[in-house]
Every structure is written in C-alpha cells, then in structure tokens.
C-alpha cells in the first residue's frame, strides 16, 4: 500500500482581523493510492483547509508548517493535472459566460497538450461519461441553462478532464437535494473506479461518507481525532465524538447506518 500523499505534522494558521486562527493542528495522515477516503467533521473542523492544503490552494497569507509529500507520484503534483477538485458550489468553478464544452476542452488542451478538435472530442466523451443528456448540444450550453445537479456533473467532468490521480470532492453534494445527491455520489464512485483515481471525499455527513468511502478520518477543532476502516468507525467508534456524530445521524434518520456502510464495500 503506497501512500499517494503523505501528510506529516501539518499545521495551518490563517490570519483573521490580525488574530491567528489555527485551522489544522499537527495532522498526520496518509492517503493511500487507489483508496476512497472520507474526511468528516462538523463545520469549522478544518476539512476544507486540509483539502486546500493537499491541492496547494491555500490563500497566500496562510501559514503552513509541516510536510505534504507525494511518494505515490514521485514528484510534486501539478495543479489541475494531478489533482481534480470539485467544490460545493459548481457555479463558483464554472465560468458563467463560456460554453461548458469549451471549459472542459480547455482543461484537456492545457494539461494534455491536445488540439482544440481533440479537446472538444474529449469534452464530449466526458459529458457522456457524466451522463449529461444530449452531449452534442450540451457542449454549447452555458452553465445557467443547467440544473444544479447537471452543473455539478459538468464541474466533475472538468475536474477529471486532465486524468488526475487524486480527485478531491469538498462537500460536492451538500447543495443538492437527496435524490440528486445520491446520483452524484454514484457518479463519483463510478468515475473513480473507471479511471483508477484516489478519492478524498470531504463531507459533514457521516452516512454519506460511510456509503462511499473505505476509510473515514474524523476531524474536530482542527485535529484528526479518529481514522479507520469505515465498518470499524461505524460499528465500534473509539472516540466519543465519533459516537456522537453517529448518534446524531441515527437521531435524524432511522435508516440503519450499518447497512449503508455494508453497501459501500
Ligand atoms: N480564509 C480564511 N481566513 C481565515 N480563517 C479561515 C479561512 N478559511 C477557514 N478559516 C477558519 O479555519 C477554520 C477551519 O475552517 P474550514 O473551512 O477548513 O472548516 P470546514 O470543516 O471545512 O468547515 P465547513 O464544513 O463549514 O466548510 C474555521 O475556524 C474557519 O473559520
């Protein structure tokens, strides 16, 4: 089991109104090549900061201590090429005035050195793979002509257009209704399997994480409080905080989490 990326003693500090905010504290974590790893925790626990740190997208003003190494790549990752990033709000990652076909083609052209016709052919294939209806006309559509779920499909197509080794989905389904959420989770699972990607799935929803991931990392107040196989975390959480997350889920939704985690394996 090679670590695609190996995080050691990672501490990230933001500055807000002249005060230092420690968003991550001494994190040690390996993301294993080919695995689906979920990072869960409540709002403000540092999940997005971890995702941004791995992707090299932290704001310039933030202070980063520790190391993020890439033994599975053998070199530093190239942004956009080796790491695909899907954000919560697809509108934020899509250009509102550019046809979606061009947006996806541009990623393929830039990172894979394709000609425009080759890049458009790739974009069309990607729109088929993310199951957007009528890919030929969808190439020419603008983001505002699509539903939220369709926009997220396009954002996922753009994120994987350069064939990244690692796909990071940061609350990628949180803004969608439950049915669309399940469809996008199924889509991510299929694409990750088809392309042999490693998945880092960030979510505040332990049930969703259990459905998709083989391992779960639980964050709280910027610290990694628990890490383990999904079934172990769900069946026998070692930390009271993880137990509380599970209990909160059971309180809200009677569907047995164990069955859902069973589906994931
Ligand atoms: N750019 C920033 N400048 C200052 N503080 C920030 C910045 N981004 C995040 N923080 C702070 O860092 C901490 C961790 O935030 P982060 O967004 O990583 O958590 P999160 O678990 O992803 O939360 P959410 O689920 O709400 O997105 C929080 O206290 C947050 O307010």
Image: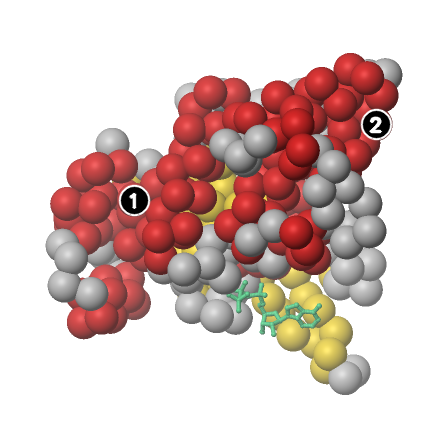
Whether residue 49 is visible here, answered yes or no, is: yes
Q: What residue is shown with label 1?
A: 211
Where is residue 110? Give x, y as percent.
83, 27
Task: Choose between 71 and 249: the one closer to the eye.
Answer: 249
Task: Choose between 193 and 9: the one closer to the eye.
Answer: 193
Where is residue 25? Give x, y as percent.
55, 62
Q: From the viewer's perspective, tell me whether residue 10 is left or right of residue 232.
A: right
Q: Residue at x 81, y 45 (%)?
A: 98
Where is residue 143? Give x, y as percent.
69, 50
Q: Residue at x 71, y 18 (%)?
A: 121
Q: Residue at x 61, y 29 (%)?
A: 135
Residue 226, which numbered label? none
Q: From the viewer's perspective, tell me whether residue 72 is left or right of residue 91.
A: left
Q: What residue is shown with label 2?
A: 110
Which comes before the other along the chain, label 1 or label 2?
2
From the viewer's perspective, is residue 242 above or below residue 232? below
Quadrant in the picture for the N terminus: top left
Quadrant in the picture for the C terminus: top left
Q: Quadrant of ligand 1?
A: bottom right
Where is residue 31? Give x, y as percent.
49, 36
Q: From the viewer's perspective, tell me whether residue 97 is left or right of residue 101.
A: right
Question: Tell me, what colour scheme is on the image?
Answer: secondary structure
Q: Quadrant of residue 263?
A: top left
């Amino acid at each position: 089991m090679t670590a695609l990326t190996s995080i050691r003693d990672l501490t990230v500090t933001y500055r807000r109104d002249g005060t230092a905010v420690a968003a991550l504290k001494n994190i040690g974590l390996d993301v294993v090549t080919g695995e689906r790893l979920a990072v869960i925790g409540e709002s403000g626990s540092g999940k997005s900061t971890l995702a941004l740190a791995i992707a090299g997208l932290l704001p310039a003003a933030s202070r980063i201590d520790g190391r993020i190494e890439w033994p599975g790549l053998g070199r530093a990752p190239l942004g956009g090429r080796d790491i695909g990033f899907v954000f919560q709000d697809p509108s934020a990652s899509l250009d509102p005035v550019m046809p979606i076909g061009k947006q996806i083609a541009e990623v393929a052209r830039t990172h894979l050195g394709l000609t425009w016709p080759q890049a458009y052919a790739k974009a069309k294939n990607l729109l088929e793979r993310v199951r957007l209806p009528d890919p030929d006309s969808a190439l020419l559509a603008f983001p505002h002509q699509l539903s939220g779920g369709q926009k997220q499909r396009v954002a996922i197509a753009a994120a994987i257009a350069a064939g990244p080794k690692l796909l990071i989905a940061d609350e990628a389904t949180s803004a969608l209704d439950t049915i669309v959420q399940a469809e996008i989770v199924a889509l991510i699972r299929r694409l990750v399997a088809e392309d042999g990607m490693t998945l880092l799935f960030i979510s505040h929803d332990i049930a969703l994480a259990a459905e998709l991931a083989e391992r779960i990392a639980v964050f709280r107040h910027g610290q990694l409080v628990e890490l383990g196989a999904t079934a172990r975390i769900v069946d026998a959480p070692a930390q009271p905080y993880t137990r509380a997350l599970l209990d909160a889920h059971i309180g809200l939704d009677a569907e047995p989490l164990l069955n859902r985690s069973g589906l994931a394996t």
